[in-house]
Image (spheres, rainbow, N blue to C red):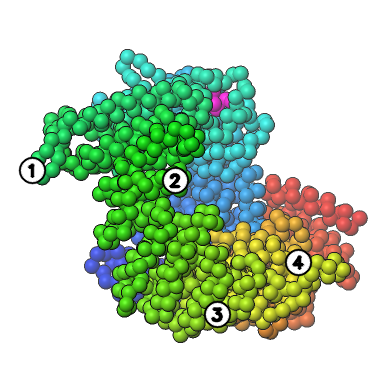
Amino acid sequence: MGMLLLLPRQEVLGHGQASEEASLRALESLMTEFFHNCTTNERKREIEELLNNFAQQIGAWRFCLYFLSSTRNDYVMMYSLTVFENLINKMWLGVPSQDKMEIRSCLPKLLLAHHKTLPYFIRNKLCKVIVDIGRQDWPMFYHDFFTNILQLIQSPVTTPLGLIMLKTTSEELACPREDLSVARKEELRKLLLEQVFWRASGISTVLLLPLHHRPRPQEKVSPSAAKLLNQPIPILDTDSEYICSLALECLAHLFSWIPLSASITPSLLTTIFHFARFGCDTRARKMSSVNGSSHNALLGQERGRLGVLAMACINELMSKNCVPMEFEEYLLRMFQQTFYLLQKITKENNAHTVKSRLEELDESYIEKFTDFLRLFVSVHLRRIESYSQFPVVEFLALLFKYTFHQPTHEGYFSCLDIWTLFLDYLTSKIKKVLNRIQFRYNQAQLEELDDETLDDDQQTEWQRYLRQSLEVVAKVMELLPTHAFSTLFPVLQDNLEVYLGLQQFVVTSGTGHRLNITAENDCRRLHCSLRDLSSLLQAVGRLAEYFTGDVFAARLVKVTLYGSQIKLYNIETAVPSVLKPDLIDVHAQSLAALQAYAHWLAQFYSEVHRQNPEQFISLVSTALEAITPLISCKLLLSACHLLVSLATTVRPVFLISIPAVQKVFNRITDTSAQRLPDKGSVQRAAAALAQPARERAAVGCALHQPRQPPKVIIHQTLSVLEDIVESVSGESTKSRQICYQSLQESVQVSLALFPAFIHQSDVTDEMLSFFLTLFQGLRVQMGVPFTEQIIQTFLNMFTREQLAESILHEGSTGCRVVEKFLKILQVVVQEPGQVFKPFLPSVISLCMEQVYPIIAERSSPDVKAELFELLFRVLHHNWRYFFKSSVLASVQRGVAEEQMENEAQFSAIMQAFGQSFLQPDIHLFKQNLFYLETLNTKQKLYHKKIFRTTMLFQFVNVLLQVLVHKSHDLLQEEIGIATYNMASVDFDGFYSAFLPEFLASCDGVDSNQKNVLGRNFKMDRDLPSFTQNVHRLVNDLRYYRLCNDSLPPGTRAPALRRAQPRVLGRAPSPRSTASFEFSLPSPRPQLEPAGCVLINAHPRGIPTVGKSLSRGFPSAPVALCCIWRCLERSCPYQTRGRSAKDHFRHSYLRVIPPSCPAQLSEEESPDVGTGLALLSLPLFLNCLENLPDVGGDLETFFGFFLNVFSSFHCDTKTTCLMGIKCLLCCFK
């Protein structure tokens, strides 16, 4: 094989039978070698290259056809099918019509002959290849494609094969890939919908036959719903179960895309629901477990799988929100049958409980059934609730049993989602929810939940479980808060008594305190009680909005102080790996629950602070005493959050005088604060907020060193200062003024130190982070002179060399420095008024002349987002810097044509935005597109004269090229809207100048295809129609390129062969200037496999195609249709002085014999394509105004047509008669 494959193509094709056999033996050897474990990668690449070269040869498919029929090697068969797949999807346009007919004939015969012996994956692959042919040629050249599938389904021997073919057809034709034009996709979908009724009825018959015991031949099966639902589930043999599973899989895929219509009959629905009963039948599982044989176990699994597949079909129907009025009665029948299934699943008797019955069922079946219930409640309940025939109350009762007897957590989660829509019924069952989250009742299941690994939402599995359960309780609380409180409070009280009673078991040992509870059963009960208390404390915090604090606040303060005083979080236990985390979690949850009542404490303080504040002072003082001992990191974070809430929400004036607060201050200002973890910054910020100004100034004293301070001191000090500024930024003006006065000296020292550390990016990063927070929170308090000094210092220090060093050589830290500097400038440029306007030229110059040249060519997204946000802020908040206009001038002129200033800077900024659309970063693309749209919405950017005349169509061209290249497909909708907004500024220019020039500049398509693209782009001016036209243009342009690339070498038009890779952005623009161009090169898009449709026939191929007509049938239909398609488009081309019309006329007359025979032979019998080609003559005759012998053509045409009419397919006869009618109307 290796030698034969390396021979020239002519030699390979000329070897004959011996060559084929030798090639087969060699190919089997190569494939075995390729997949052998000892074969090296280098050898595999050689074999792969050899096989790929062979697959590209013309005529290789004949060898593959021989291989498929003569080998049993799986590797060889899969390779041969891959060659056929490549031929059909990439090179079908260049395959001769005779070869196509042979392939269409041989592959189905091969499948029919060997489908029972082929491995399933080979059989499925062969089905896919045949369907690919149908995707290209049906119905014009493969008119019996669907007829053959129906015949396969109707024949008992080939029913499984027919169902596989039908499912594959639904998968490949209903939602085809992008290698088809939009028109072909719409045609396929329309044709498929026409076939759905017959295919669905055929599948229904296939499903019904096994349900009847020994049906008589030709027996008509039409069972009623009651009969099917009441009869026992039959025992199916293996073949029947296999056929039914294939039929249900096929129906599920059909239901996923067909609309609800009359093709879905009541009989079909009843049959599907009968199969859904297979999933809730526990007898088969019992029989298989009792008998113990693997065969019986397999039968039980298959029966359960039939139920799962049936529920999948039903769910596909239920997921459709668009329900015609005539289909609502069907829905009622479906839900009545669902009610029957729910009764069967939740039926309880002496032998079975509901939970045991659910445990016996397949988990997949339970999942599908729950999905159906969710769809019923969320989508269709409003349609069904008004029907008196549907028992809503009984349904809720069964759903309640189904929910709280779920054997798995996932099933319970899914049912909880359903119950959120039935809160009126669930209010009386809230205790069930609380029991499900308590270890006291449900320890075995709850222990299985992971409480360590965080998911994407930063929650553990246990936290998610608890949160969802508490959300259901919270919704019930909205309706009946008293009822929920009476249920929750006793359970909380019981667990609190256990927790508060632990003090009596604390004893002193040599190393500290120890909990004297050692019995295994006591430790287990304590563990359950602590876990439940933690959950209930979280519930108390979640429900704080429904309670007044006098019930819970004092009790929570007592609990937190109790835990801090006896230090239960640091006590020795008999099981430290279990009980110590439980004690820490209870303490943390008590602090968090108390934090939730901060708003009540603030209201309580406003009511009593002038009369009897003793109770309030006691509450706050006790809470702060509980906060002081901060040992564990988890407790540290919870305590800090509580302290922040007390300081910012409650804000008691006596806070500074509380001894516990003084201790916190001393700890912060002491050197031990340096040893606090990073999360301690929350604590330091909260304490600094409560600290008076004179003490706050002492924090910055670390900066006043006689010599250059160490990095560690600067880092820690600036961190504290940043927390102070951030915490006070939301306060009143007076508070911020006091804060800045305290920090003023530290700020000045920090600014003086900045030049000394400009080359140390880690310190510069910390300093800029502090100044950014300062600008965001206290820029008004800093005053204009000092702010100008800071900005000028930064502008002087960040030279181009320094920026390049930070971005290019210092890695991520250096980039963060530049990003924070740009963020500071963002705050400056969006400040209203004229104070900072003098800095605008310097800021723009810094961006466009220093930063942008460094990052423009970098693929890394670092700094780019912040730079373009700064440029957007410059434009958005300083529009009058570029466009000056007065209201009076605008009124006088009627149109606001502002005077343009700083045009060069504006053009440079727009150029930068345009260049960013040529880069692969999708986040930057989306951000900048949003910025342009915002500027257009707020400032009418697209309407400005400079943009409209020199930039508009450049941007439109770039956006269209991005769509064509599929580089940012996730943003298709946003790009389409932006294109419309730009084009709507000058629709006349877009349609008359831009679109023709854009199409003229497109590579890879010929002039005929460009004309078609232009005609298909309708001149609509509304947003939905325009964007639809844009996406159609993009899809068809890509499709034409794929088809053209699939042409055999040497057959392409010269314009296609000369096409070179284009430079994205060199746009056709009717008013563009050479000074404004986007010139970044973009790679040519990767071409995908393409099918071939005759609609893309090339003009220069018409004379060659016309000559093929002289050979007669069956090549004549192909050639006629090919020329007809070209003529239909009126392609304006000339070949050797002869027009397309002449070629068509002469070629057409060749196919008609001089003397019409009375009867054509079987080979000459025209197919559907011939009939359609003949009917194209009226179009041709309308164009032949200057030819004298039109009448002769008509006479010849009618004579030949009447002779061959009887041999047409029945569908073609109908079409032909309609065509004759139109012909007579044209030449009346």
Instruction: Tell me the SS state at disc 3.
Output: helix
For residue 511: magenta? no
- Is residue 677 visible in the rendered image? The answer is no
The correct choice, above or below, for 968 with respect to 172 in the image is below
Residue picked out by circle 1: 510
Q: Whole-percent x and y of residue 1124?
A: 73, 64
The label nearer to you, 1 versus 2, is 2
Q: Whole-percent x and y of residue 814?
A: 41, 75
Say whether residue 910 is left or right of residue 721. Answer: right
Q: Look at 60% across and 24% down and name the residue there.
A: 385
Residue picked out by circle 2: 653
Q: Whole-percent x and y of residue 1098?
A: 67, 72
Say whether residue 385 is left or right of residue 549. Answer: right
Mark 2 vs mark 4: which is more N-terminal?
A: 2
Q: Look at 47% across and 33% down and name the residue there.
A: 611
User: Residue farthest to the front?
Assistant: 611
Q: Whole-percent x and y of residue 451?
A: 30, 43
Mark 1 vs mark 4: which is more N-terminal?
A: 1
Mark 3 to mark 1 CA distance (whole Å):
68 Å
Residue picked out by circle 4: 985
- The amino acid on which the numbered mark 4 sits, given as a three-letter code, is Val
